[in-house]
Image (spheres, rainbow, N blue to C red):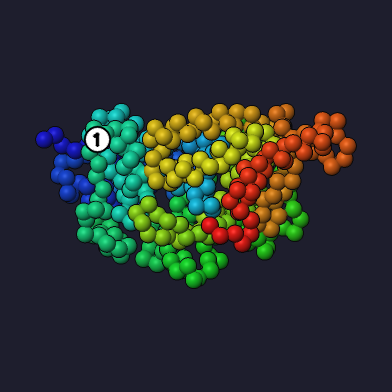
Amino acid sequence: MSKLKIVLAYSGGLDTSIIIPWLKENHPGCEVHCYCGDIGQGDDELRGLEEKARKSGAASCRVEDKRREFLTDYVWPCVRAMTVYEGRYLLGTSMARPILAKGQVDYAKEIGANALAHGCTGKGNDEVRFELAYQALAPELKILAPWRHWSIRSREDALDYADERGIQVTASRTKIYSRDRNLWHISHEGGALESPGNAPPDDVWMLTADPRKAPDQPRELTIAFEHGTPIAVDGERLPAEQLLQRLNELGSTHGVGRVDICENRLVGMKSRGVYETPGGTIVLEAARTLRAITMERDTLRLCERLMPDYADLVYTGRWFHPTRRAMDALFAEATHLVTGEVRVRLFKGTATAVSAKSPHSLYSEDLATFGQSAAFDHADSYGFVKLYGLPGAVAARVQGTGEGSQP
């Protein structure tokens, strides 16, 4: 049997740092290569990552800038679909895992690796997201998931393991929260958040200002869209990563994008999470308003009916599934004319669209006006109402379906 050449999805955190020596100890003679995609985690997480991986025993470590690709190929499709999981979660982690897994697979193929590894636990959704991506993109590669096999069961165990092997980690025994950050959001779990009866402590929040302490004067901005995706802020066309960063900064100043939810994980348990998604909240508010004036009624309603199914595909790790690709094509076609500008007001934790305009707007002031209209004859409504109500009228006459009738 040939020796294992493994590519590990690497973050530099406690778990992935100790996975490197664990793999080498439990698979003698193996090579461990690390892969990390930069999708906006921030300099604090990425600085010195290659050296850190090598000191932990890795044969190599690649860090790739994936920020623009993350937004254009993963986030913007979800914006076109107005994707929200269980009514509130904007899928920041769910959208990020497929691009990280794809980068990992691409690196594995480049260096001739025969195995992939991740540091996800058995309780969360991420193990499914990574492994379904592996199966779709490289089913021939062996998958290693140390959390399913090792004896480490707590943060303290992991820190002891690192200390015994001289591996330096920034984690401490007093760390309170588990966090995941990228350009779209930051999530917070653990500590006091594990009880839904506790309000989020003030020290949870990292991006957004307390809405109560946000500026007393609102800030209005204009977002331009082409074909359902944002392209400019206040008239300045920007690359995707710069556009979202601008919106993150503005939204954070005004306390926009805080969400506290108890969601249903794929594995069956409920999980309480606190999320900060300032720029994404602004983008979705603007997109929703622009869709309202540019999308024909039946198409808009079809997209609204399909959105929960699309959100479920993304949340449960089926990004590379044929169904998601097919639905993505539908949403792209449905939003082809969602082009225009939306003005959004930021104030004390809220993002509210206040105006919208589009060269493809279906809104007709002449039709909608309460005043005299040259395009609408009120007399036409008589026959429409009579025919529209005909099925109910027939049922009432024949079956007596009025109030108080018996079946």
Q: Residue at x 53, y 69 (%)?
A: 199
Measuring from the top left, give residue 334's x and y in whole percent. Answer: 58, 31
Q: Quadrant of the N terminus?
A: top left
> Eyeballing the image, is 118 above or below 268?
above
Measuring from the top left, give residue 284's x and y in whole percent. Answer: 60, 44
Left or right, residue 197 beside residue 379 = left
Measuring from the top left, give residue 23's x and y in whole percent. Answer: 22, 47
Q: Residue at x 59, y 34 (%)?
A: 299
Residue 212 shows in this picture: yes
Q: Which residue lies furthest to the left in this view?
A: 1
Of the pair 239 and 365, the residue shown nearer to us = 365
Left or right, residue 275 beside residue 382 = left
Measuring from the top left, give residue 216's x and y in whole percent. Answer: 75, 59
Of the pair 398 and 323, the residue shown nearer to us = 398
Left or right, residue 111 beside residue 319 = left
Q: Which residue lies furthest to the right in this view?
A: 372
Of the pair 54 and 294, the residue shown nearer to us = 294
Pointer 1 residue? 141
Dot 1 amino acid type: Leu
Q: Which residue lies furthest to the front in this view?
A: 398
Q: Residue furthest bottom?
A: 197
- Label 1 environment density (alpha carbons within 10 Å; few <14, some 14–19, many ≥20): some
Q: Is mark 1 on a helix, strand or loop?
A: loop
Q: Residue at x 21, y 55 (%)?
A: 150
Q: Residue at x 64, y 36 (%)?
A: 297
Total of numbered circles in the picture?
A: 1
Residue 362, picture quadrant: top right
Residue 320 shows in this picture: no
